[in-house]
């Protein structure tokens, strides 16, 4: 299983547009219910973190979901530095991931 984290910061003026795009993406995910992924989005002030687990042998379904592509586009425009997915090591979780 691949564990990816995407961290980025946006100006306060852009927080609501990113938050709205996140909500739209998760609404679409709840409707489409793609298999083989676990996905979470976190925010603290101007900082955002997305956590994505992709099961072995599963192609990331997010690029095939329009609202997820729109989220990516919104983030690309708003982030102060271009976010890049980076792998992370899951050391422990309880009903989280």
Image: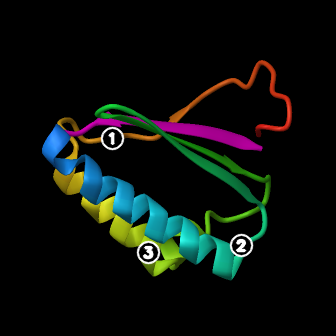
Cα gap from disc 1 to disc 3, whole angstroms: 18 Å
Labels 1, 3: front one: 3
Q: Earlier in the sequence, mark 3 or mark 2?
A: 2
Q: Main secondary structure of the magenta part?
A: strand
Q: Which residue is mark 1?
A: 83
Q: Residue at x 56, y 72 (%)?
A: 27
Marks counted in the figure total 3
Q: How is the image coloured?
A: rainbow
- Give the CA separation, mark 3 to mark 2: 13 Å
- Residue 45 pos. (x, y %): 33, 31
Q: Earlier in the sequence, mark 1 or mark 3?
A: 3
Q: Above or below — where is 28 with respect to 71? A: below
The magenta region covers 1-10
Q: Position of residue 11 (x, y in %)?
A: 16, 38
Label for residue 67?
A: 3
> 33 or 63: which is nearer to us?
33
- The residue labelled by disc 2 is 34
**Looking at the rendering, which quadrant does residue 88 occupy?**
top right
């Amino acid at each position: 299983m691949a564990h990816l984290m995407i961290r980025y910061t946006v100006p306060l003026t852009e927080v609501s547009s990113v938050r709205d795009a996140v909500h739209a993406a998760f609404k679409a995910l709840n409707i489409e219910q793609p298999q083989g992924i676990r996905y979470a989005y976190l925010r603290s002030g101007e900082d955002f973190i997305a956590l994505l687990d992709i099961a072995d042998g599963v192609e990331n379904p997010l690029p095939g979901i329009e609202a997820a592509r729109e989220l990516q586009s919104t983030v690309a425009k708003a982030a102060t530095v271009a976010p890049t997915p980076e792998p992370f090591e899951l050391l422990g979780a309880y009903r989280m991931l």
